[in-house]
């Protein structure tokens, strides 16, 4: 049923609560887990040579995030294969593009429980992915206790 599961990593790195869910699903179905971090390209900004070091730092942080999540998945008792991806682009569009390019069967999205004006101003990548995804999406709530 599920051969390839996509796990997009939250920009703040708060994805670890999704790891046991993904590991369980991947082991149950013999699926490969694809861990994805999207560097929001803001093309006109990241391509400006004056801020090259910022773009490099963002990309390095993205590689660190996928590496940490991949290690956490591999540290579970589940016998699963893990592949990592770092891409530049608009997060929801890039997630959809990767879903199509790897032929994912399922997306497991970390999500925050923002409400009111914060949600309106910040938008919701998870909500857009759920609305636009050609495959099922599971939303795993992250720990928002530290957000004040």
Image: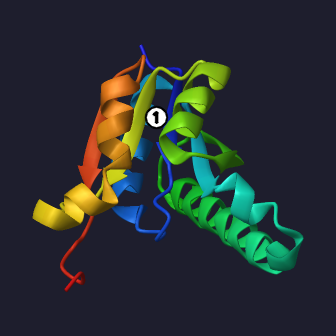
In-image side of 49 versus 131 (left or right): right
Most distant residue in the top direction: 1
Q: Residue at x 55, y 41 (%)?
A: 79
Asked whether residue 2 appears in the rendered view, the answer is: yes
Q: Residue at x 48, y 40 (%)?
A: 92
Across and down, in percent, residue 119 comes to: 22, 59
Name the element at disc 1: helix
Depth check, front residue: 114 or 18: 114
Question: 96 above or below 94?
Answer: above
Asked whether residue 41 appears in the rendered view, the answer is: no
Label 1 belongs to which residue? 26
- Quadrant in the picture for residue 104: top right
In-image side of 21 versus 36 (left or right): left
- Quadrant in the picture for residue 25: top left
Across and down, in percent, residue 76 comes to: 48, 56
Q: Quadrant of the N terminus?
A: top left
Across and down, in percent, residue 38 comes to: 60, 52
Query: Mark 1 Cα within 10 Å, few/some/many (few <14, many 20+)?
Result: many
Question: 118 above or below 83?
Answer: below
């Amino acid at each position: 049923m599920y051969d390839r599961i996509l796990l997009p990593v939250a920009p703040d790195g708060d994805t670890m609560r999704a790891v046991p869910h993904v590991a369980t699903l991947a082991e149950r179905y013999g699926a490969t887990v694809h861990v994805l971090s999207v560097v929001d390209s803001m093309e006109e900004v990241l391509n400006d040579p004056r801020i090259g070091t910022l773009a490099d730092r963002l990309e390095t942080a993205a590689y660190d995030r996928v590496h940490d999540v991949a290690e956490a998945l591999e540290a579970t008792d589940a016998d699963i294969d893990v592949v990592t991806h770092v891409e530049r682009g608009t997060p929801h569009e890039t997630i959809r593009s990767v879903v199509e390019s790897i032929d994912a069967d399922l997306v497991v999205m970390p999500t925050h429980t923002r409400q009111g004006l914060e949600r309106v101003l910040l938008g919701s990548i998870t909500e857009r992915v759920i609305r636009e995804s050609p495959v099922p999406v599971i939303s795993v709530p992250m720990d928002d206790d530290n957000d004040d």
